[in-house]
Image (cartoon, helix red, strand yellow):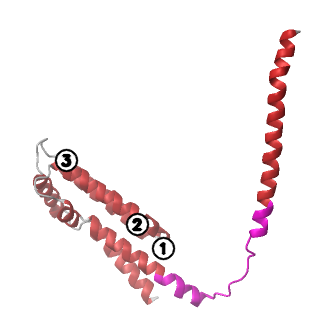
Amino acid sequence: MDILLEIIKITLPSLVLVLLVYIMLKKQNERLAKVANQNKVPQQKTGVDGGEKIKIVLPLKLQAYERITVFLERIAPSSLIMRIHKPGMSAKLLHADLLKAIREEFEHNVAQQVYISENSWELSKQAKEETIKIINLGLGNMADDASGIDLSKAIFEMMMQLERSPSNIALDYIHKEVKQLING
């Protein structure tokens, strides 16, 4: 009997507390829902016709294509190496800095996919991935004590073997798409 009484002494206050918290949270949710409904903006027709939408959206699209163009130019190996390489860098440090720069450029421009075509976005991502592969292959052929200049040479040699760079392939497509967008 004493044990049962002790269990009731412990559980009863806990149950009461849980019940009170539940009731308070339920009331707070109801109040929040009521406030949210009061603050809702009614849906109204804006009266924007197709021509006005084009005037609003076209500059956004063009700006996105411009930013993707800058992205592709900045991740081109020749541009990257010229910007990132510092005298005395090891191949491993240059490799890490090149990959970091590509990641940062990509993250900075990821929102542009909303405004450009799916094909343009996919080609831009593919250019990024192919550039990373080239940089990784360049390092893969290096000795542990190789310099940044050695890695740069290896990357440039691989790029010369390609008919067109990954960035140029994407840029050519984007240029054609922008011309179609502008000319209707």
Residue that badge 2 annotates: 109
Given residues 107 and 175, the one toward you in this image is 107
Given residues 4 and 46, the one toward you in this image is 4
The residue carrying pointer 1 sits among few (fewer than 14), some (14 to 19) or many (20 or more) residues within 10 Å by Cα, namely some
Amino acid bearing label 1: Tyr
Amino acid bearing label 3: Lys
User: What is the C-alpha distance between the residues marked 2 and 3?
Assistant: 26 Å
Give the secondary structure at mark 3. Answer: helix
Rendered view: 140 above or below 9: below
The residue carrying pointer 2 sits among few (fewer than 14), some (14 to 19) or many (20 or more) residues within 10 Å by Cα, namely some
- Name the disc covering residue 115, or none: 1
Which residue is at a point 78% across and 53% down the rendered structure image?
Answer: 29
Q: Is residue 134 left or right of residue 44?
A: left
Residue that badge 3 annotates: 92
User: What is the C-alpha distance between the residues marked 1 and 3?
Assistant: 36 Å
Q: Position of residue 174 (x, y in %)?
A: 37, 75
For the stretch drawn in magenta, the main secondary structure is helix
Q: Position of residue 71 (x, y in %)?
A: 33, 68
Determine the image quadrant of residue 156: bottom left
Amino acid bearing label 2: Asn
Region in magenta: 34-59
- Name the disc covering residue 132, or none: none
Which residue is at a point 15% across and 58% down the rendered structure image?
Answer: 86
Which residue is at a point 17% across and 65% down the rendered structure image?
Answer: 82
